Image (cartoon, rainbow, N blue to C red):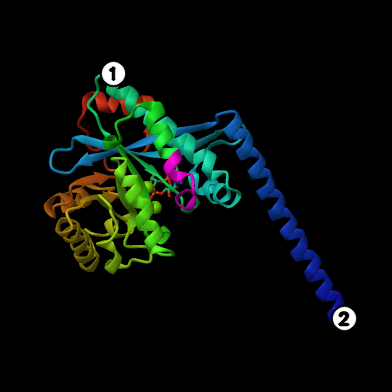
Amino acid sequence: HAKVSGRNQYQFFSKDMNAKARSRLDLEARLRRALANEEFAVFYQPKVRAADSRIVGAEALVRWLDPDKGLVSPGEFIPVAEETGLIEPIGAWVLRRSCQQTKGWQEDGLMPVKVSVNVSPRQFRSRTLLEMVTGILAETGLDPRWLELEITESMLMNDVEAAVRKMTALRDLGLGLSIDDFGTGYSSLSYLGRFPITTLKIDRAFISDVDTNPKTAEIARAIIGLSRGLNLEVVAEGAEVENHVTFLRENGCDTVQGYYYSRPVPADQFEQMLAVGVLHHS
Ligand code: C2E
Ligand code: MG
Ligand code: MG
Ligand code: MG
């Protein structure tokens, strides 16, 4: 009897696994098609200078316009892209597109702003990362000082020496490096001084209750102070309400990003925002 039920369980498990594997394979195939058919788009979320609400940059965020399923968010496909290696061509596409569009806005005489592009763990580990970035900068003609790459702490901790070498080579190109989601990774403050970074980006987990939780507020203040002390730019992500922005402004956070100002928007819409130059809340 036990054997029978054991087998039933096994069959159930195996069916479930098959379904999972099938949907993963299906997603992988659709992602390959998406690459070939250019079904991706870059959306831009403005970064605003807290002091005067001027747009100083944007984060480039990939979107997938699936002809069958509509707009798919990165949370749904980046993990599979990462596992299958498709993140490398997708990531290169996002970087190329972001640099092209940013250069295009500059050529149109719009106020120059910095574009921040996310780099995944697998992209960061790739031996061709430096070559890829160098090639795209040359191809698009974007001055590297208008490019920033966002990486996360966890990518840096496996092999700190190698990470420092890689980051140094990237910085030598003239671009900026930001630690994304700061405070949520394997935060090792002892290494922070060794990483050749330009920016700390406070995770939105700390921003969401700065106005209601005194301890969170104290942590946010500490991160802002740490950035100042290390001479880094500090960006807050996930500012959703006026109280968040007021807190950040009063506590010396340079740059703010979040739904309070704007959601990520398609390129043409971001271009219209750039033409105005300042943002008030959305
Ligand atoms: P991230 O790099 O931390 O990007 C910030 C995420 O927070 C974005 O989600 C953005 O839409 C969202 N966000 C911004 N402001 C607010 C706010 O005020 N409230 C809330 N609740 N959320 C806010 P999105 O676009 O869905 O991207 C999710 C993650 O996917 C990104 O997190 C990043 O890790 C990854 N990702 C997005 N685009 C790319 C890409 O081109 N390449 C790679 N490797 N990863 C990407
Ligand atoms: Mg990011
Ligand atoms: Mg982030
Ligand atoms: Mg995040």
Residue 74 placement, left or right of 105: right
Query: Closer to the observer: label 2 or label 1?
Result: 1
Tell me if mark 1 has few (under 14), some (14-19) or many (20+) residues whose alpha carbon lies within 10 angstroms of its own: few
Relative depth, front residue between 140 and 8: 140
Tell me if mark 2 has few (under 14), some (14-19) or many (20+) residues whose alpha carbon lies within 10 angstroms of its own: few
- The residue lying at 74 percent from left, 65 percent from top is 13
The magenta stretch spans residue 206: no
Residue 128 placement, left or right of 185: right
Quadrant in which the C terminus appears = top left
Q: Considering the numbered disc 2 on the image, is that residue within a helix, a strand or a loop? A: loop
The residue that mark 2 highlights is: 1
In the image, what residue type sits under mark 2? His
Q: Is residue 175 above or below residue 80?
A: above
Residue 6 placement, left or right of 213: right
Residue 153 picture quarter: bottom left
Q: Does the magenta stretch mainly form a helix, a strand or a loop?
A: helix
Q: Considering the numbered disc 1 on the image, is that residue within a helix, a strand or a loop? A: loop
The residue that mark 1 highlights is: 108
Residue 34 picture quarter: top right
- The residue lying at 23 percent from left, 59 percent from top is 210
Quadrant in which the N terminus appears = bottom right
**Residue 263 coordinates in the image, percent (x, y):** 35, 39
Report the span colored magenta.
123-131
**Residue 200 coordinates in the image, percent (x, y):** 27, 53
**Residue 186 coordinates in the image, percent (x, y):** 38, 66
Separation (CA) of disc 2 from disc 1 = 76 Å
In the image, what residue type sits under mark 1? Asp
CB atoms of marks 2 and 1 within 8 Å: no
Q: Is residue 207 above or below residue 174?
A: below
First in sequence, mark 2 or 1: give its number: 2
Residue 282 visible in this rendered orientation of the protein:
no
